[in-house]
Amino acid sequence: GTLNKVLIFPSEVACVEYLFRPNSVGLCFCGLPHGVETSFSHLLRYILSASSSLDLCLFSFSNIDLKRAVILLHEKGVTIRVVVDKDYSAITGSQIGCLRKAGIRVRCEADYVHMHHKFAVVDSRLLITGSLNWTLTAVQCNRENVIITEEAELVQPFIKEFERLWVLNDPA
Amino acid sequence: GTLNKVLIFPSEVACVEYLFRPNSVGLCFCGLPHGVETSFSHLLRYILSASSSLDLCLFSFSNIDLKRAVILLHEKGVTIRVVVDKDYSAITGSQIGCLRKAGIRVRCEADYVHMHHKFAVVDSRLLITGSLNWTLTAVQCNRENVIITEEAELVQPFIKEFERLWVLNDPA
Ligand SMILES: [Zn+2]
Ligand SMILES: [Zn+2]
């Protein structure tokens, strides 16, 4: 059937190194629990499942592991596009500069008070959206929700909104 | 089929008086556009569709029209339960005190950094969730999304989360 899943946060804290380096299993001595699936490891898995494209529309993006996932996909040849809130893209800890340095296309939305979306579309097929900003506090400290769905009636309007904001904020 | 809908904000600004007083159609001289359906009027309609229960789990709640909708349902005999973030329940413009005065049960969540959810469950069947806080800025000024769904795989985890937070924050 169509994938429909809900992740509830805060997530337990556990090592996610194996998601980035599968060969590291059993060889990581970071001190965090290993071999534990959490809301955050599931979130990372869905993002890392991208094989052709990843569109991100985010209010804030400071989470290091999420940045690492996006950079890894970029290095694998996945087409990444990012739309972010202009004010929040420049705050302390923001990973937006880092994405740009890696060659990822980022556009800033400044028209409204806040670009408050927090969604990702994987391979134009899978929607990841909810209350969760891409920060460490949101993942580990807040009560939050993330919906994962392939339901076309839900995914399509987000794809449409992304394309609209992408064109609207074309700096050219 | 199962209801699945996405509302995109900011909403156009239009009069919503007819949703509260159907007899007022044609008799309102507020100066706003009339007879216009907007993202916000759709959101209000879904909330006002509650016939037996409305569970709210909200980070912030200052929007006057949304408060009016909740009070109207309460007066009609719909069972309302509200879980809110403790810090934000007391800020200027918060309608939480007003809900309490009307006799609606409100519980404050103070355990984590933020209770950042922003969802409603109507009649234990319809889920309303997204990036949108229940404020005027979110509705009229921000880029936001709201998902409306009856998909059981999505609705059930939110019901479970609500019941968990409701019990957890029982002051008794
Ligand atoms: Zn480790
Ligand atoms: Zn009017």
Image (tube, coloured by chain):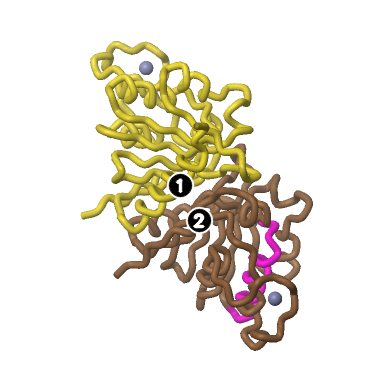
Chain colours: A brown, B yellow
A71 within the magenta span: yes
Residue receiving disc 2: A8
From where the camera sits, is residue B141 visible? no
Q: Which mark is residue A141?
A: none
Q: Nearer the viewer, mark 1 or mark 2?
A: 1
- Residue A156 picture location, percent across and down: 38, 58
Q: Is residue B86 left or right of residue A90?
A: left
Q: Quadrant of residue A76?
A: bottom right
Residue type, label 2 = Ile
| Residue A90 vertical placement versus B107 (above, below) | below
B80 within the magenta span: no
Residue receiving disc 1: B164
Give the tally of numbered discs.
2
Q: Is residue B137 left or right of residue A87?
A: left
Q: Chain of mark 1?
A: B
| Residue B13 vertical placement versus B155 (above, below) | above
Do the residues at pointers 1 and 2 share their chain? no
From where the camera sits, is residue B170 visible? yes
Name the residue at the left extreme: B1
Please tell me whether mark 1 sits on a helix, a strand or a loop.
helix
> Looking at the image, which residue is at 31% across and 19% down?
B75
Q: Main secondary structure of the magenta part?
A: helix
Q: Quadrant of residue B122?
A: top left
Residue type, label 1 = Arg
Q: Is residue A89 left or right of residue A56?
A: right
Q: Is mark 2 within 8 Å of ligand 1?
A: no
The magenta stretch spans which residues? A61-77
The quadrant where ligand 2 appears is: top left
- Residue A114 picture location, percent across and down: 61, 41
